[in-house]
Amino acid sequence: MPGIYLDRRNKWLAAIRRDHWQPTSNSRLCSQHFVSGRNNDNPMSPDYIPSLFAYSTSAGQRQGSIYATSRFEHTQQMKRIRTRLWFLIVTMRLWHLPAPVMPLGLTSP
């Protein structure tokens, strides 16, 4: 885990772009530097590393970040739905109940 922590820390420092500065336990980064308004601990999230700074917040970059965040959130939501659906199907099979009609695009396990 320390390797992951150091990797993320180094990416944050690179994104912040402050020469000769090392964060301390009292250092904070405001929510305006994250597309969704808060950081995210999932490495696949666009908010894993802060990305909105005065040097990089052109309209196109901000729009791209917003799109990436909405896609990430949609993907996470679909994963949660699929997990619940698979759990329901497995439970129904254990109780020998007929499986529900599958939504378009999903298949039975």
Image: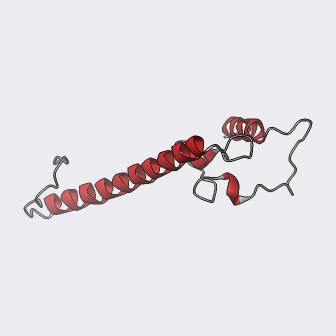
Residue 69 locus on image (x, y percent): 50, 50
Q: Foreground: 37 or 106?
A: 37
Of residues 107 and 50, the one drawn nearer to the viewer in this rendering: 50
Q: Residue 43: x percent and y percent?
A: 57, 42
Above/below status of 10 relative to 68: above
- Could you tell me residue 74's position as x and y percent? 39, 53
> What residue is shown at x 62% (from left), y 59% (from top)?
37
Answer left or right for 70 relative to 55.
left
Q: Residue at x 60, y 49 (%)?
A: 47
Residue 97 placement: quadrant: bottom left
Q: Viewed as shown, does residue 86 lie left or right of 94?
A: right
Given the current orientation, which residue lies at the most extreme front position? Answer: 59
Q: Is 48 left or right of 98, judged from the image as shown? A: right
Looking at the picture, the colour scheme in use is: secondary structure
Q: Residue furthest right?
A: 20
Query: In screen coordinates, is 54 left or right of 98?
Result: right
Q: Nearer the viewer, residue 100 or 61?
A: 61
Q: How many marks?
A: 0
Residue 86 placement (x, y as % from top left): 25, 54
Q: Is residue 34 above or below residue 13?
A: below
**Residue toward you, 36 or 62:** 62
> Can you say which quadrant of the picture contains the N terminus?
top right
Question: Which residue occupies 70% across, 41% down?
Answer: 5
